[in-house]
Image (cartoon, rainbow, N blue to C red):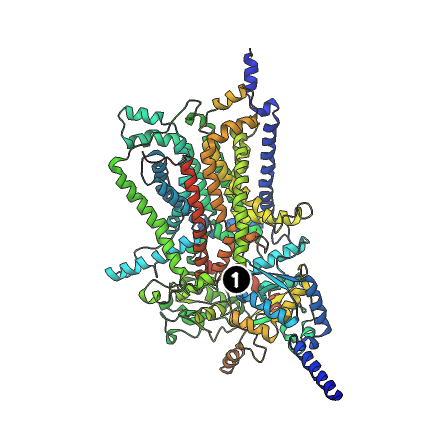
Amino acid sequence: MRKLRWQRTMVMAIVSFALISAQNVDSASWTPELQKIIEGAKKEGQLRLVWGGGSLGGDAGVEMFEAAMNRMFGTKIDIKYSPGPSMPSMGSQIAAEYAAGQSSVTDVYIAAASYAAPLVQRQIFHTVNWPELLPGRITAEMTEGNNSALRILSGLPGVPYNTRRVPKSGMPNTMDGFLKPEWKGKIASTPYAAGFDSLADKSMWGPEKTVEYVGKLSKQIAGLIRCNEIERVASGEFLALVLDCNGAATAEAKLKGAPVDLMIPIDAAQIRYFYLAVPKNAENPNAAKLFTTFVMTKEGQEIVWKTTHVDLHFFPEARTRPTVERMKQKGVRFFEPTIQWSLDTPEIDQLRGKMAKMLRSPK
Amino acid sequence: MLSVSSLLQRIETGVNRGDPWAGLMVAVAVLCSIIILAPLCVVVWLSFFSGSPLDPISQYSLENYTVVFADPFTYTVLLNTAGFSVISLVVAFLFGLPAAWLVERTDFRGKTSLFTLMTVGLLIPGFAVAMGWLFLLHPRIGVVNQFLQTVFALQDAPFSITTVWGMGWVQGLNLAPLAFIMTAGVFRAMDPTFEEAAHASGASASKTVFTVTVPLVWPGILAAAIYIVTVGISAFDVPAIIGWSNRIFTFSTYMYLMVSPQEGLPRYGLGAALSVIGILLAAALSWWYSKVQSRSHQYEVITGKAYQPKLIKLGRHAVTAWVFVGLYLLLSKFIPLTMLIWASVLKYFEMPSMEALTRTTLDNYTSLPWELVFRGARNTAILMVLTPTITLIVSLIFSWVVLRSRVRGRAVFDFFAFLPHAVPNIVFAIGAVLIALFVLRNIVPLYGTIWLLLVLYTIVRLSYGTRMMNSSLIQIHKELEEAAYVSGSDTLGVVRRILVPILAPPILYGWLWVALLTYRELTLAVLLSRAENTTLPVVVWSIWLNGGFSHASALTVYMLAVLVPVIGLYWVIVRRTGIIPTAN
């Protein structure tokens, strides 16, 4: 009887322990480095995020991240989000604050390669051994800039178009198709020549062909819109946008029922990464590192997909992965503009400004 | 018995008599002038600085000027800006001036409604109005164009809003309330003696208006014209929505591209070099305005004698007045508001149709980022109360120093007060941010706080406040104040007991308008926005900028709905205090 009671007590203790542990099931598997960051984040208790509303779902996305991250790590971090300016403006602001000895406006910086590169060059970000925080999940190929920036999603830029006014069969599958007379005065491009910097690389079109194309495109387009102004394509104001940033805005509009779709040109295919980095002058560096780490977990990537409709294609469960694999099997060659590529090709940076200027001028 | 010399001594304004209050007012004007000049000095310094100020390899050179002035595109931009500003002025006066005259000088029965319409009109954000007109008269998707092309089998769209003319039209409609408010006070305070004399001599109403009324209010009209032209130069919303996407750039949008580029780090130096043009233009416009002021005594009609404004009877012309009001209502309010509400009930924007009607939803109203909205609303409310209060106090001080004191070189204060208006807010904000970051960081921690916004908003609105005060103070003859000085009053007493009561109508107008301009202020707030000081317009703009036009429209409708009762309350108060004369 006494033995039976003791056994029952042991079973109850084990079950209780399992139930308690289930709430924080991964805590036992956190590395010491990550555990240190979690403790630091708990002391900080808050995180300030400032980026454009279209990045990671803006306010709604941050709410999802906050709840899931706190649940996973057992923290109570209060994330305060504010809409911010464009990525290069944000980067400039962070750099200015760093130089002035002020805390940065945001604890985490999100940017594409060409915007993050100047700040990486100025060593403004914390260097973190990200693979050590989530071994087996974060690998070396996901980090750049000497571990100062972490890839979090793989955008697939293309040409969003209005499906009501343009049938799929009527859409060209190469960039040259948009130079034909039937498109004149009906399409748009971006004021920052999105995507054309990658085409200027020698392994793609090269600088001369790209500049020549942009010059011809400038005479074709009716105007300039930003990547996330897909409503202007959906309304029919412009029949297509040549080229967009990462396809995310199109996917989101399509889910809302907008008559848009995305065509990825086979001669201009790119994988455009977005990065997260923690400025050295962040007010809450541990919370920032913890947030960045969380984005790379399965749950975090699920929220990335929900908010942007793209994720990091390196992961086996990534929904962007089949699209990339399928296109590769068809012989499409993807160019990947990385931070290192941006730093190694300063002439492309100047070319980007030249092409943006060409698109701005109708002559 | 006082001697003539001692009487004259008493009449002399306080500064010369050692009046501490007068000295304090001058000191405030000097301090504010320094605060205005500091960011401008940073702008000029930046113009000689190639690259980024943070880059150790940057150096001083004239490269920015060479790049800007050697680029033919710069001149295209300047030409677009000139055309846009002039057309905006013409359209603003086309509607604003007659409206001000109808409200203040006639027995028009709808004046209270017209006044309210003009006031409410300023609430609608510029980008909302621009989008409304874009989908009305866009050459490819404009509803009017599509209808006309279908009915008359036209190949090309007959109208296009995507031109400098179209942009000027929309901006002019936006600025008509400003033209109204800047001239309404002047019309109201005018002594009708000269008009009565004209009537008694047999002059018709129209002849009286053009030969008597307009010349008398000319300084006020000129002040409004100068202000509206400079608003056109600095305008961002309408050129960004209509012009930018159709590759028509004006000063502001081109500047924005330079300081907030999408490729590489911002080149503040190029924007600063371009802004020097704005500073020079501001200097020219201020000089012109000061010339008008120097002849101001010719236009003084408010004297120590009692006066009662007499209203002109419209008679059968009242019908014309109503048609005018109805047309303005349709073009400036009904159409853009309708498009705004339409956009707010859609999942994605589409042309109005029976089919689209079946896809309407109220989700956009319930799924807003509420924590962010309330944070923005709180900051906006604080700024809406403090900015106009401080602006008008400082504006009165500036105007008094310029028009009443005998401080040597006092005209330069007026020049300083006008400068922030002429310099595009974008670069002015950059200068202020760099000062707060690098200069004041250990002295006064303004960076990232709402107080930096308050300082900037006040500085930027100072030009409006001083124009209002100047054009009203011009109309007050000095004999009233001289009588007070002779009676032993000091400067504070003169200001408190003489000037403020007389200036109460324009002060009230000015307070409301600065509050409304603060309510919708966007450019400064966007550049200075941090978690702690984000404002409601920034929340709206950010949502719109990231493709959420329907959500942005819903939030804008909320903003309008919240403020309409406030406007209604103001309308009741000003009616009771007699600011708006009722119809006879």
Rendered residue at 35%/25% (across/down):
B194
Percent across and percent down for residue B80 are 42, 49
- Please name whichever residue, B343 or A211, is drawn nearer the observer in this view of the structure: B343
Using the image as rendered, state which of residue B352 and residue B32 is in the foreground. B352
Q: Position of residue B48 (x, y in %)?
A: 60, 47
Front one among B64 and A297: A297
Q: Quadrant of residue A146?
A: bottom right
Give coordinates of residue B364: x percent, y percent: 44, 62
Residue B445 located left or right of residue B563 = right
Image quadrant of residue B127?
A: bottom left
User: How many residues crowd mark 1 within 10 Å: few (<14), some (14–19), many (20+)?
Assistant: many
Horizontally, residue B189 falls left or right of residue A334, namely: left
> Tag 1, which secondary structure?
loop
Q: Position of residue B528 (x, y in %)?
A: 57, 52
The answer to whether A20 is drawn above or below residue B417 in the figure is below
**Circle 1 sits on which residue?**
A53
